[in-house]
Image (cartoon, helix red, strand yellow):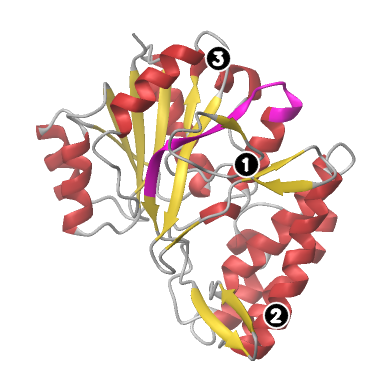
Amino acid sequence: MTTLGAVVVLFHPTAEQVAQVVELRGRCDDLVVVDNTPLPDDRLAILLADRGITLINEGNRNGIAGAHNRGLATLFERGVDAVALVDQDSVIPEDYFPVMREICTTLAPQPFLVGPRIFEEAIQDYVPVLETNGITVRQLHMHEDAGMQRCATLISSGCVISCSAFAKIGPLDEKLFIDCVDTEYCFRARTCGVPVYVTPALTLSHRIGALRRHNLGPYKTITLNHPWYRRYYNARNSVQLLLRHGRRYPVIFLLNLFTLREMFYIALLEDAKLAKLAGIMLGVVDGLSGRLGPIEHTRPRLVARFAHGAGRRRLEPRLDQGRRG
C-alpha cells in the first residue's frame, strides 16, 4: 500500500486554518507544514510540536515554489511514496486520502502527477479541465464515473506528486516564485515523459484569487482582481513559459494572449489600474530578459512606488495561486 504524505503551506493562517491542519494529520501517513509567514510564530511551533507535526519556517524566501520544495524533499527523504500539496484555503474532502492512496497504488511504480477536479467557491462553478497535444487545446468532460484522464495542467493544491516523478522532473522552479509554478511543472513533466492525470472521483473546493462575474451587454466574463504584484508575476512567468516550452508546446502562447485580455479587463473593470498595468508591462520585459526571482529583488523601485499606494495589500503573495500558480 502506498504511503501518502502531505505538505501544507501556511501564510498568516487563521485559527480555523491551523485547526484544519492539525485535523489533517490523522488522515495522511505523514505531514509537513511549511510556514511562509515572514516572522516565525512561536505559538504555532509549540502547537504543531505537541501534535507531532513537523514545522519548517521558510519565511517566504523563495515563494510558493520554495515552500513546496522544502516539504516535498523532507517527506521523500523519510521514505514517503507520494505527497499531496495542500493550500491553507483548500477544503480537503473526507474521502480524499483514501481515494488518492488507492490511485497511487494503482499507478505505482511509474512516475505520475494526479489531482482532483477544482470547484471555485467564488463563482460556484468547476474550473475547466484541459488537455492539449501541444498545438490545440480541448476541454475534458468530467463525470464521476469516467475514471482518470490525462490532462495538460493541474493547480498545485490537491496535486499528488510521486517520489519517482519528483526524482525525474526535479524541484519546482523557485526563480518563478509564485504564479505559473504549477503550470511550468506540469509542462516539464510532459517533457520528461511523466503523465499528468485528473480524477473526476474527487472534488476540491478552492478559492482562486478574488474572482468576480461581470455582464458586458450580452457577454459574461470573469475578472481575477489580483493585486499589482501578482499581475507582474503572472505576466513575467507566462513569458518565461513560452520561452522555455513554446517550441515544443506552442499552445503556451495562449497564456500570453490571456495576459493581453486581462489588460483590457483591468482598464475596463478593475481598480488600481495604473499599478496593475505597470506591473504587467514590466513583467513582460523581465520575462523576456530572464530577470527572475522575488519582485523585491527584480523591481525594488516599483515596490517602493506601489507598496503603500495603489497596491494597498501585503506584498507577500497569498496562497491562492490558482490555475496559473
Q: CA distance from mark 3 to mark 2?
A: 41 Å
Mark 3 closeness class: few <14, some 14–19, many ≥20 residues within 10 Å: some
Using the image, determine if residue 103 lies above or below residue 321. above
Identified by mark 2, the residue type is Leu
Along the horizontal axis of the image, is 273 left or right of 70? right
Identified by mark 3, the residue type is Ser
Q: Is residue 42 visible?
A: no
Residue 104's spot in the image, x, y percent? 44, 18
The disc placed on residue 277 is 2
Along the horizontal axis of the image, is 165 left or right of 254? left
Disc 3: which residue? 164
Picture mark count: 3
**Region of the chain picked out in magenta, as a range:** 190-204
The disc placed on residue 312 is none
The mark lying in front, picked from 3 and 1, is 1
Tell me which residue sits at (13%, 41%) in the image: 46
The quadrant in which residue 175 appears is: top right
Disc 1: which residue? 153
Residue 122's spot in the image, x, y percent? 41, 68
Using the image, determine if residue 108 lies above or below residue 212. above
